[in-house]
Image: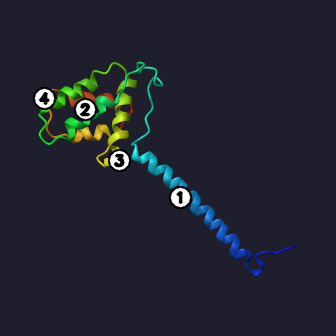
Amino acid sequence: MFDIFGKYKNVAIGIIIALVIILVIYFWGKRAGKLKANGPEVHYPNGGNGIPAGWDPKPLAKELHQVMDGLFTLSGTKDAVFSKLLALPTGDMFTAVYSAFNQLYFADGDGTLREWINSEKYTDFTSNTVEDLNNRFDQLNLS
């Protein structure tokens, strides 16, 4: 039989195994990096059926980012936008805004929408908006 590797057969097999392991680790890490760049995976409570046709969560996600990213945003302005999120009628719509926000801004390194909201120092202390949002995040298992 024709022997390509001759006395280096064991070395060649070792190199091939090492290359396969390196490729598996590379693709596994690449996949994990993509998941992390968009934030945690979300599950819609009604499988997405609670999202009206044609409704887009991105405008509210961008508005949330705008009020939280701004340096001189009044607490009443923040609470008004937080109230818009809280007033969404379905868990699917709430989850869609959470997901859209994370897809747009999670890679910036400041965390999920919930983490952004909880890191806000200037909110209306007379309202329970942030606490109510955290309760809704908990109900929908959104971290």
Residue type indicated by callout 3: Ala
Q: Which mark is residue 26?
A: 1
Residue type indicated by callout 1: Tyr
Sequence-wise, the earlier of marks 2 and 3 is: 2
Q: Which quarter shows the C terminus?
A: top left
Q: Which quarter shows the N terminus?
A: bottom right
Closer to the eye: label 4 or 2: 2
Q: Mark 4 — residue?
A: 76
User: In terms of secondary structure, where does tag 3 sit?
Assistant: helix
Which residue is depicted at the point 13% across and 36% down? 73
Which residue is depicted at the point 28% across and 32% down? 134
Report the Cα–Cα distance between label 3 and label 1.
20 Å
Closer to the eye: label 4 or 3: 3
Whole-percent x, y for residue 79 in the image: 18, 29
Instruction: Give the colouring mode of the picture.
Output: rainbow
Q: Mark 3 — residue?
A: 107
Sequence-wise, the earlier of marks 4 and 2 is: 2
User: In terms of secondary structure, where does tag 2 sit?
Assistant: helix
Q: Which mark is residue 63?
A: 2
Q: Nearer the viewer, residue 72 or 137?
A: 72
Do the CB atoms of the residues marked 4 and 3 lie less than 8 Å apart?
no
Residue 109, relative to residue 134: is it above or below? below
